Image (spheres, grey):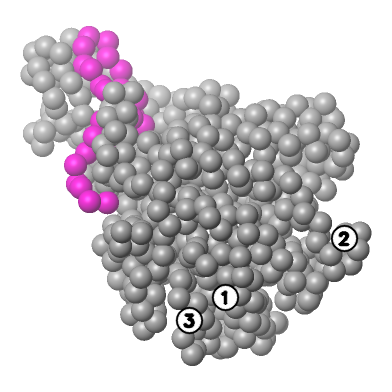
Amino acid sequence: MKKSIYGFLIFVFAFHQVHAQDFLKADGKKIVNEKGENILLRGIGLGGWMLQEGYMLRLNNDGQQHKIRERIEALLSKQQTDEFYDMWLSNHTTKADIDFLKKCGFNSVRLPMHYDLFTLPSDKEPVAGNNTWLTKGFALTDSLISWCKANDMYVILDLHAAPGGQGNDLNISDRDPSKPSLWQSEADRKKTIALWHQLATRYANEPTVAAYDILNEPNWGFEDSVNDKNGLGEKTNAPLKKLLIAITNTIREADKKHIIVIEGNGWGNNYNGMLDGGLWDKNIVLSFHRYWNYNDESSVRDILKAREKYNVPVWIGETGENSNCWYTQAVRLFETNNIGWSWWPLKKLGANNPLQIKSNLNYNDLVNYWNGKTNEPPKESNVYSGLLELATYTNFKSNIKHYDVVDAMMRQPFTDETKPFKLHKIFNGAIIKAVDYDLGKNGFAYYDLDTGNYYISSGKPGVGNRGGVYRNDGVDIYQDSSHYENYYVGSMENGEWLQYTINVKEDARYTISLFVSSVNADGKIALTDNSSSIGNVLQVPVTGGEKNWKVVTINKAVLKKGIHHLRIKAIKGGFTFKEMQFAK
């Protein structure tokens, strides 16, 4: 596997290499460097580092970071809670993460910043109206910039959690609804403006910083706070425009060079009224966020119209949280239209990102308590141990690397070629796990009927991998045991198939044994080798349980020495598949 993966990384590194020591700027409809060359940003957001969201930690409710902290402090001391957050910040994102992203082909990262790492809340300032500046956030940002500079990568600074909170989607900005929002507090708006002046002053001459994304996903109903609380129907967005202009002006007092990224209302997409009269700065990029939609031309029509109308570059500042199939389609769509992108996020507790944070038993018990699955809180020592272990597991060296996700984003958008997920050498006694099918697009490396979540466009739920573990394709993968790293393919439907590139070491006849199970349906399986049938169609017996494995075999299958593409096809579905074994 290592040879295959590292070869892939070298390929994308060479193809996507960008030198990030030039200042970037808006030039008509393009983002260009100082030589005037078009720059297509291929980035990823560092969500969860400076700002936690509950879903990233598998929490079902109260997902604001301040609520998570309150929950922890209800079970531990403040000192222990601070220790957890210090460990989290020091482990979650390090130079190793940025080195990895460079090798994978990314040329930029978007840093979601929480204001409380840079300054005190307005209502906690010792002197009302003053700004106390904290060192933590600036130091973390300096470190990230130095790691990106060393890798010729860009950083986009993104104010993800503004003072008071910029929307009614509470988790995004860690908003406390019992207090005035950003839009209800003049003090918080002044603090937001002052924070950007500090940042612009600090990084005015730093070309590694590509842009200032000045307010993430505002979602506020200015005209109708009851029926349109997230601002999707806003017609003028006047308060938002006023604040963005004020932030732009304070940045330009200190920094004339950097791109300013603006986002519309309604989670970044509603620009109604905001651009009337034209852009207020010559170096602006419009950001749009896209999730769970069909990846067709209609999904970017409004983006392209805005680019044409205002002669301004556009950028997908956030997208992701879906299947590999969706990722491949989206990247192809964006890049075909010369739209740069930033995926969301790099890592979390979950498999649909390049890196996955591992959990632990003590933390799982804590989540079950917080989610109401158990009534009694875990012991304090177990809570403390579980949280510190989780903070340690956020570190790159402990992360699970999902190369299938990277492959879907970086290689698959412009090729139908498949690649081995692992090097399957066939000899007497060889075993291939069902979940180790080839890397590639749906219809080429595998075929699955439910390939992703398109509910924004279709109105129907979809999930891709229903089991949500191991890989992120449309194939449904489940864990055999909560304590062991054993997996199987389930929910096989009529017509679905899996392809395995195998390397047969010598001409021979093999018995191919498939470990399968079926609860109450009689499945049928066909095997092909480079499109030629192998043996007869196999009948899957009813085994009485999804994990009650039985063996079906094809005898005397002739396999010649060399590379083969073996496919396992569900002529009739309703069964699960664990592995296949080869015996001479």
- Please rate how many residues cluster around mark 1, counting C-alpha atoms within 10 Å: few if below 14, some from 14 to 19, many from 20: many
- Please rate how many residues cluster around mark 3, counting C-alpha atoms within 10 Å: few if below 14, some from 14 to 19, many from 20: some
Q: The disc labelled 3 sits on which kind of residue?
A: Leu
Q: The disc labelled 1 sits on which kind of residue?
A: Asn
Q: Residue 525 lies in what quarter of the image?
A: top left
Confirm or deny contact between disc 1 and disc 2 (CB under 8 A).
no
- Res. 38 in view: no
Q: Quadrant of the N terminus?
A: top left
In three-dimensional space, the C-alpha distance between marks 1 and 2, rounded to whole angstroms, equals 29 Å
Q: Mark 3 points at which residue?
A: 279
Task: Give the residue drawn at x 66%, y 87%.
Answer: 223
Task: Give the residue drawn at x 36%, y 32%.
Answer: 435
- Secondary structure beneath disc 1? helix
User: Between disc 3 and disc 1, whose residue precedes?
Assistant: 1
Task: Give the residue drawn at x 41%, y 60%.
Answer: 24
Residue 106 coordinates in the image, percent (x, y): 39, 45
- Report the mark closest to the observer, 3 or 1: 3
**Mark carried by residue 125:** 2
Prevailing SS of the magenta stretch: loop
In three-dimensional space, the C-alpha distance between marks 3 and 1, rounded to whole angstroms, equals 16 Å
* For residue 146, side relative to residue 116 (left or right): left
Q: Which of 396 and 351 is in front in this view?
A: 396
Q: From this view, report whether residue 572 is shown above or below residue 331.
A: above
**Mark carried by residue 265:** 1
Residue 438 coordinates in the image, percent (x, y): 27, 34
Is residue 428 part of the magenta span, yes or no? Answer: yes
